[in-house]
Image: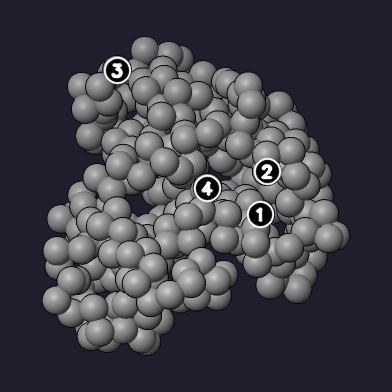
């Protein structure tokens, strides 16, 4: 289905909704709707998944930020994580390449498998893991180095090029894939932080893909960008989805609808619903999802 045909560009008015949750939020409805722990509505599992995640719990000290979440993520799938602020989207995303390791009070429990390898195995090489599972952050964060050196950084660390010409090729190829080559080719040795925000974010994507990852995690990658830069990054996500598994956290439902094939809705650390994106946005199965997409809380 073409999502542009079905996408709600504005939250639906309550009278347009067909299911019986047309109550103001202060009413009994949405706020008291229950999530049964560990029970997710929709299609959380897949055959031959890239990630197989079972009974995942994440604690910050005593605080349980992720509550018994089980989910598979398919190969070459773009999946969007949505939900109200503080519901655990970033926390869950960061588990997938162990970015949470750097937070002292953070503990991760459960089974997290990437291609049948335990991400949290005590002998897991985390540097190698992060090369396979790259990350793009909310705020573009290029190194204060040249455009070339930003993209070459990972390949140099991982010894992916034996000679300068090979490194040049990787840099060019990554910038091309990130849709930045034409803008960058004449200023490869200029400082990266001199570029526009949108260009910097595409540079960060180029940097992430320069080490040939299998998965790219994106945590609200467009929230600091203007609409034109956002459109370029979204276009890029669609192109990259042919080669990579992409997991994108977004607070924009329109963005989720434009770029993803499946959407997972989180609420207070629970995975409430996961389904085809078109289904989540047009006929969600859970009352909480419906309340969120109709703009009753966010
Ligand atoms: N570094 C941290 N230390 C303590 N608590 C945290 C930390 N990061 C996030 N949290 C808490 O975990 C919960 C989920 O946060 P987060 O994953 O950032 O949500 P989201 O990305 O959906 O907005 C929130 O209650 C938040 O306060
Ligand atoms: Mg977040």
Disc 1/disc 2 C-alpha distance (Å)? 11 Å
Front residue of 54/298: it is 54
Q: N-terminal of the two: label 1 or label 2?
A: 1
At 41% from the left and 41% from the top, the residue drawn is 243
- Relative side of 141 to 135, left or right: left
Q: N-terminal of the two: label 4 or label 3?
A: 3
Disc 1/disc 4 C-alpha distance (Å)? 16 Å
Q: Label 2 belongs to which residue? A: 114
- Relative side of 221 to 93, left or right: left
The quadrant the N terminus occupies is top left
At 83% from the left and 60% from the top, the residue drawn is 123
In the image, residue 71 lies at what x, y percent? 65, 33
- Residue 95 marker: 1
In the image, residue 30 lies at what x, y percent? 52, 31
In the image, which is nearer the foreground, mark 1 or mark 2?
A: 2
- Residue 1 marker: 3
Q: Label 4 belongs to which residue? A: 214
In the image, residue 58 lies at what x, y percent? 74, 53
Residue 52 lies in what quarter of the image? Answer: top right
């Amino acid at each position: 289905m073409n999502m542009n045909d079905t996408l709600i560009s504005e939250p639906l008015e309550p009278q347009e909704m067909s299911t019986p949750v047309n109550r103001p939020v202060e009413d009994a409805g949405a706020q008291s709707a229950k999530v049964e722990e560990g029970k997710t509505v929709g299609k959380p599992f897949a055959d031959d998944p890239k990630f197989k995640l079972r009974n995942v719990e994440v604690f910050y000290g005593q605080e349980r930020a992720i509550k018994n979440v089980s989910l598979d993520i398919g190969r070459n799938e773009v999946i969007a994580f949505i939900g109200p602020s503080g519901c655990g989207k970033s926390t869950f995303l960061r588990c997938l390449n162990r970015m949470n390791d750097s937070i002292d009070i953070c503990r991760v429990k459960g089974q997290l498998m990437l291609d049948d390898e335990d991400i949290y195995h005590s002998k897991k090489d985390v540097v190698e893991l992060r090369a396979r599972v790259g990350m793009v952050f909310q705020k573009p964060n290029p190194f204060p180095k040249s455009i070339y050196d930003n993209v070459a950084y990972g390949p140099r660390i991982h010894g992916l090029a034996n000679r300068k010409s090979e490194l040049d090729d990787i840099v060019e190829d990554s910038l091309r894939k990130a849709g930045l080559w034409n803008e960058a080719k004449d200023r490869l040795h200029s400082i990266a932080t001199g570029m526009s925000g949108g260009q910097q974010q595409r540079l960060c994507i180029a940097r992430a893909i320069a080490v040939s990852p299998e998965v790219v995690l994106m945590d609200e990658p467009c929230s600091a960008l203007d609409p034109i830069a956002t459109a370029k990054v979204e276009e890029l996500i669609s192109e990259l989805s042919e080669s990579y598994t992409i997991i994108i956290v977004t607070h924009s439902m329109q963005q989720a609808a434009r770029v993803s094939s499946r959407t997972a809705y989180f609420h207070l650390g629970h995975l409430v619903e996961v389904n085809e994106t078109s289904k989540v946005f047009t006929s969600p199965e859970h009352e909480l999802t419906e309340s969120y997409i109709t703009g009753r809380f966010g």
